[in-house]
Every structure is written in C-alpha cells, then in structure tokens.
Image (spheres, rainbow, N blue to C red):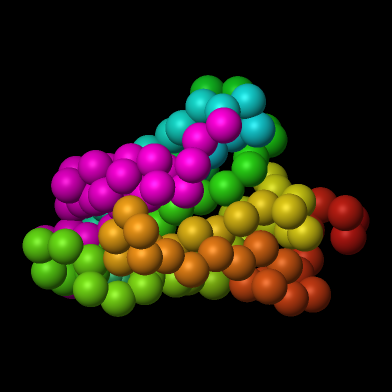
Amino acid sequence: MIENSELIKLALEARRMAYAPYSGFKVGAALLTKEGKVYQGCNIENAGYTPTNCAERTAFFKAVSEGEREFEAIAIVGGKGELPDDYAWPCGVCRQVMMEFCDPKSFRVITAVSETEFVERTLSEMLPHGFGPNNL
Ligand code: THU
C-alpha cells in the first residue's frame, strides 16, 4: 500500500525532469497501478507548441505502453517556482485520458504542493458525466 505522501514524493521527483522551456511551468506526475507499481511522468514541451505533452499523459502513456491497464491514483505537482506553490489540476485532455483507463468513481486524483498538503478528488468529481468506454 503506497501512501499519498510517497506518491507525491515521486511526482516531485518526476517534476525535476520537466522539459518546459516555453511556459516555465514544470509539472510532475506519479501514477499508481492497482498492483502497486508507479509510473512517473513530466511535461514535455515543443517549439511547435501543440505537440506538448502533459505530465499526466506522459505517465499514462508510459504505463499503458508497458501493458498496464488498471490504475488506482495519480499524484500531480506543478508550478513555475523551484517548488510548487499552488495546486495544479489536470487539463481537460488529461481528464479524458484518465476516463479511458480508470473507474471514475474510484480513481483518485491527488494534487499537491508538498508531501503533506494536498487535495484529493475522484475522477468523476473532476469530470462529471464524462464520456468513456462504457458509453460505446
Ligand atoms: N501541463 C501539464 O503537464 N499538466 C496539466 O494538467 C496542465 C498543463 C503542462 C503543459 C505545459 O507544458 C505547461 O503545463 C503549461 O500549460
């Protein structure tokens, strides 16, 4: 069982790898699978702007490309400073990617400014009436 504080620590570690020369907004994510494995991700910007990938999607795509399909929670940290100073919430595109692979009622989104200061919401709270695989 991985505590939220441990997952946040791994998100803070991932944030150090953020490639954000254009916005300066560095984001880190740590995605926990149901089996207890963690995949880290950072945002990766691009001179063409639109190819930019968010930290959350980097973590998801790393995990899914390794065969993972079942997820428990994701911790997210972001900000322009050396350390995050406000809660970074996932963008709409990342919420939709979560909707593809996660149970909206139980998947936990944890946004944090430190290992002890965080807010936790379920995916369904973040994306009410979302469209997912069960709708097709
Ligand atoms: N970003 C993320 O990594 N995750 C989010 O959910 C919101 C935005 C990144 C994308 C871009 O590199 C920078 O933050 C500013 O939008």
**Above or below, comparing residue 35 to residue 61 in the picture:** above
Locate residue 61, reporting x and y percent. Answer: 49, 40
* Direction from residue 121 to residue 47 in the image, left or right: left
**Above or below, comparing residue 76 to residue 7 in the picture:** below
Residue 77 shows in the view = no
Q: Which corner quadrant holds the C terminus? A: bottom right
Asked where in the image residue 124 lies, by quadrant, the reply is bottom right
Image quarter for ligand 1 equals: bottom left
Asked where in the image residue 48 lies, by quadrant, the reply is bottom left
* Direction from residue 35 to residue 104 in the image, left or right: right
The magenta span reads 1-30
Identify which residue is drawn at 40% across, 48% down.
Answer: 5
Locate residue 49, reporting x and y percent. Answer: 27, 66
* Direction from residue 11 to residue 122 in the image, left or right: right
* Direction from residue 124 to residue 89 in the image, left or right: left
Q: Which corner quadrant holds the N terminus? A: top right
Residue 134 in magenta stretch: no
Residue 28 shows in the view = yes
**Above or below, comparing residue 60 to residue 43 in the picture:** above
Identify which residue is drawn at 44% across, 34% down.
Answer: 39
